[in-house]
Image (cartoon, helix red, strand yellow):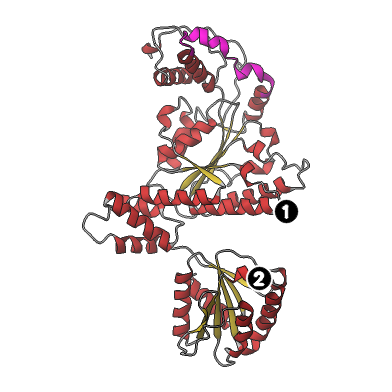
Amino acid sequence: MNLKTQLAEYVRACFTAIWVESHEHQDALSEISSLCRDEQWQLACWDIETGLQVAGSPDSESSVADPLTAIRASSALGNAGTPTILVLQNFHRFLSSAEIVQAMCQQIVAGKQTRTIFVILAPIVQIPLELERLFVVVEHALPNREQLEEIARGIATEPGELPDDLGLGRALDASAGLTRMEAENAFSLSLVRQQQITAEAVWELKTQTLKKSGLISLHRGTQDFDSLGGMESIKAFTRRALRPNGRTTSHCRPRGVLLLSPPGCGKSEFAKALGKEVGRPVLILDVGSLMGSLVGESESRTRQALRVIDAMAPCVVMLDEIEKSFAGVNGNGDSGVASRMFGTFLSWLNDHQSDVFVVCTANDVSRLPSEFGRSERFDGVFFLDLPDRAEKDAIWNIYLDYFEIDRDQSLPDDANWSGAEIKSCCRLSGLLDVPLIQAAENVVPIAVTAAESINKLRIWASGRCLSASHSGIYQRSHGHGKSRRKVHRDPSAN
């Protein structure tokens, strides 16, 4: 339902206080003006710069720049037979005054008799406690896909400036969440740079939204799934779920995955590579950055971050080591802040309609509440175990090439090594200019230093999680933890 239709219903029902949350005041004013013309209602507008302006009246009180005077003057505008809509732009700036709040309270109540409707137009909702029960809040929706396409076609008027249907679709997907002016600016910038509307310029403008919020960071990487060894099952799962031509209706849309594993098995690298693989930006949400020192600030910043994420869709969002991010969720001395933040995040996971694919990683499942991994919050809960022999061979090949290591040498004993430890061995070999076997003397596997916790994690995941390496449910192998044979091989034979 658009703004014009919602306002028409509330005015007919004689709601005398309406708060319109909008970042596009001119467009909202245009819809309100159109409504008043169609219904033959009287329209008056006030802002601190131009004062009080009555549409169609030569005697507009432009001198009324004082907000308190404008509120009191509203009683003279009312007409019991015809509704009068008084639009107050950015009036949230003045609602810290007790006199203004009291005057507005009285005029809102009196508006039932005079049919004077107060409409506050502001980018945020900040209603004083005294006025909360008097106002109804209406959200001015951002442009939909059809409106964005109309803007794009209005700007790209020359031959060749409008891409093919696939390219235009990507640009429109990228522009979701932008205001009309932001979309127009992004399309214009794209024409100046590349003589055609593309998604790249749109994402550059969207990146500015992240910088201004300071709550989320954008990962820009060049590595895709080819840079990761193993994990074939979860690779196939996410490729299919996020395929470009997949079903993306609100009833059938990918939600995300929860990844459990010992440290160093590639959870974070997978999330970062996923964005490049499926052509989506990767947003990294650091829950620690949402914490504020004031009462209620952390919860407010959490809601703000989730709104920014929704506006950045379609995208991939990564929450790394989530059990540490919400460490106080069980009420460990933080006055319930972490619990409230976690509850807000859980509600969003379950209810959000935006095209956002969430990847959460965890190393210690015992610190996660049981409700976190329930169905419909994630499409799947995957367990990434230490790589098997075939996966290790693939990882060795990747990092031998990456660090330009001589292949005419034997590999060290990599029993119970993770992918991170293989990478570390190759990096140390190149850094110290020593053979791989000598570099391996500086690597202590996590499977040795944290053997008990890893075994506990495997026991928990067995029968409960999907396997990231093979199709189906993960089943713990009783051979895990036993020493494997020493491997000396020429990797060029792979």
Q: Label the magenta part by its dominant secondary structure.
A: helix
Mark 2 is surrounded, within 10 Å at the Cα level, by few (under 14), some (14 to 19) or many (20 or more) other residues, namely some
Q: Which residues are magenta?
A: 432-453
Q: Which residue is mark 1?
A: 295
Amino acid type at mark 2: Leu
Residue 71 percent location from the top left of the image: 62, 81
Q: Which mark is residue 95?
A: 2
Q: Is residue 258 magenta?
A: no
SS type, badge 2: loop
In the rendered view, does 211 fall on the left or right side of 117?
left
Distance in Å between CA atoms under marks 1 and 2: 20 Å
* Residue 236, picture quadrant: top left
Most foreground residue, 79 or 232: 79
Does residue 16 appear in this view? yes
Q: Where 400 falls versus 261 (above or below)?
A: above
Residue at figure coordinates x 47%, y 66% from the top left: 24
Does residue 347 appear in this view? no
Most foreground residue, 141 or 451: 141
SS type, badge 1: loop
Please state which of the two labelled residues, at mark 1 or mark 2, is closer to the viewer.
Answer: 2
Residue 387 percent location from the top left of the image: 52, 21
In the rendered view, does 478 fall on the left or right side of 25?
right
Amino acid type at mark 1: Val
* Residue 279, picture quadrant: top left
